[in-house]
Amino acid sequence: MSSSSKIAIVTGGGSGIGRAAALALLRDGWSVVVAGRRESLLAELAELAEQSQAGARVLAVPTNVADPASVRALFDRTVEAFGRVDLLFNNAGVGAPAVPLEDLSLEQWKNVVDINLNGMFYCIQNAFRVMKSQSPRGGRIINNGSISAHTPRPHSIAYTATKHAVMGLTKTASLDGRRHDIAVGQIDVGNAATELAQRMAVGVMQAHGEVAVEPLMDVDIVGQSVLYMANLPLEANVMFHTVMATKMPFAGRG
């Protein structure tokens, strides 16, 4: 199946990594359903696609991944519009204030868990529902894990806990997807230049307590990484892919 006939869903597609991935897929000929909570950002991306003559291949669907009914509607709308789902880039995620864990409110904790963990599961579940019953059968899921799926930053317990959990989702869904020709992998991104990462350029707390500026990389590099994983044949899978600013503190962090 050529890229021109493949259908992708990108959650958190209105900004940052999701936007970069959606644009990379569109440029490669994919049809892309961009999902997110901020309708204005989705509309901006759709307008960009229209200007580049890719407007017929993009569909903006306002979605709250923390709401199971909203996720179900996203997948149903995609199948209604394009007939199938070949790729889910399970990207939507949020952080919490960088405060000592004892000062984190229950509402802040639950918000991160609802979006980063529960929302990712709802999307995986619906992708399985569609992919295992379509013809040709199967598809690919790429979960956004983050560097924090491997090691934490100070004052990041909610984000880090959920991103560690994403690794469990990836491994289990990869195992369960085999019988349905569903390949499941994970991309772990470190310090891409997005709105959420701009604080790195100002300075963030390191493990020893000092604040330091950290290098950033162009977010379009992440879009190209997602595109590489997406275009693999289903007989092959990148289960874990780490792409990061070369000089950021990761190996040896802490």
Image: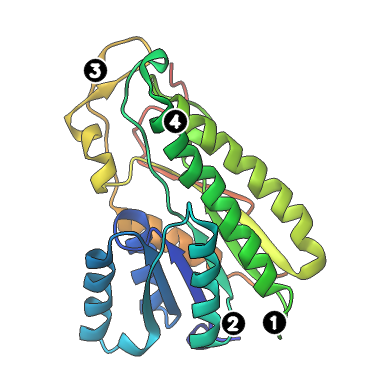
Mark 1 against mark 3, which lies toward the viewer? 1
Q: Earlier in the sequence, mark 1 or mark 3?
A: 1
Q: Residues within 10 Å of mark 3 (few under 14, many from 20)?
A: few
Q: Residue 237: where, in percent of width, then height?
A: 66, 60
Asked which secondary structure carries label 4, the reply is helix
User: Of the residues under marks 3 and 2, which one precedes in the sequence?
Assistant: 2
**Depth-wise, is mark 2 or mark 4 nearer the camera?**
4
- Report which residue position mark 3 lands on: 211
Amino acid type, label 2: Arg
Q: Residue furthest top?
A: 208
Is residue 196 something that shows in the picture?
A: yes
Pair 3/2: label in front: 2
The amino acid type of the residue labelled 3 equals: Val
User: Does the rendering let one see residue 236?
Assistant: no
Q: Quadrant of residue 54?
A: bottom left
Query: Is there CB contact under 8 Å for labels 2 and 4?
Result: no
- Please say if the residues under marks 3 and 4 sit with CB atoms less than 8 Å apart: no
Question: Residue at image x 55%, y 82%?
Answer: 79
Query: Circle 2 sits on which residue?
Result: 84
**In the rendered image of this protein, does residue 113 appear above or below residue 20?**
above
Please name the residue shown 27% across and 30% down the image. 214
In the image, is residue 196 above or below residue 156? below
Can you identify the residue that label 4 sits on? 109
Q: Which residue is mark 1?
A: 134
